[in-house]
Image: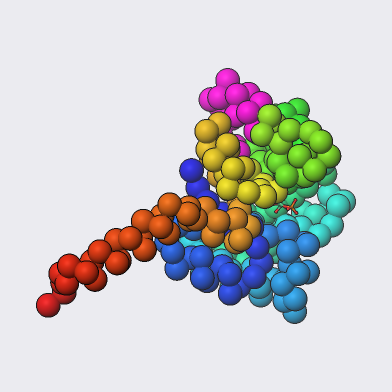
Amino acid sequence: MKFFVDTADLKEIKDLASTGLLDGVTTNPSLVAKSGAANFVELIREIAAIVPGPVSAEVGATDYETMYEEAKVLAKIAKNIAVKVPLTPAGLKVCKQLSENGTMVNVTLCFSAAQAILAAKAGATFVSPFVGRLDDIGSDGMNLISEICQVYSNYPAFKTEVLVASVRSPQHVVSAALLGAHVATIPPKVIRQLFDHPLTDKGIAQFVADWQKCGQKILP
Ligand code: G3P
């Protein structure tokens, strides 16, 4: 399973990239606004230089013509850019054109298996179903992941990867992995929570105390 970090915060990206566990980055207009960056294109250029894997950069427009022009600018920033487009007729039209030209595309704001089928047919590299936002309205985000994984596995010609987005907890990550989702894009806080277990902390404290007691050394 690939891990992307869901943030536009350069400091967080650098810090998490240093763990060696990061496979990519996803951003969206809300995350860019939160980052306070002055220049979006420059911000994406910097992120793409830190992480070799796919970096999702989202278009701002909603009409086909402007979206396509924006997409061309974003795709040129670096080789590892995945242009992010919304799951609308215009977004999928842009997706089809970009993917035919070899540009990675992340189709975002997916809330149904029907939409995920359309994204795959449009040649999306990634489809982003938002599990947390479905849970928020009393629906079951993981059920959507299960449906999409099942549908995609019925059609080996579909090459689109399921990128689980709107992740809110380590349990979301584990549930997505159990269902065989290809990627989870995870907020920095949740990535850090993945490391945590009280028995790990307790075990380390015990081992450190015993090591000190026995006076052994590994390094000369
Ligand atoms: O990047 C898209 C998605 O992960 C947003 O998550 O928490 O705003 O629903 P959230």
Judge whether residue 156 is colored magenta: yes
- How many labels, in total? 0
The part of the chain drawn in magenta is 145-162
- Is residue 1 rendered to the left or right of residue 218? right
Q: Residue 28, image x and y in percent?
A: 73, 59
- Residue 32, located in which quarter of the rendered image? bottom right
Q: Residue 118, image x and y in percent?
A: 73, 32
**Residue at the image point whose x is 48% and y is 65% from the top:** 17
Up/down of 113 relative to 44, above or below = above
State the residue in front, 106 or 94.
106
- Is residue 137 rendered to the left or right of residue 107? right
Q: Residue 123, image x and y in percent?
A: 64, 38
**Residue at the image point whose x is 77% and y is 62% from the top:** 29
Examine the rendering and report whether any part of residue 210 can be seen.
Answer: yes
**Residue at the image point whose x is 22% and y is 69% from the top:** 213
Judge whether residue 69 is colored magenta: no
Up/down of 51 relative to 121, above or below = below
- Is residue 116 rendered to the left or right of residue 203? right
Q: Residue 194, image x and y in percent?
A: 52, 53
**Residue at the image point whose x is 68% and y is 43% from the top:** 128
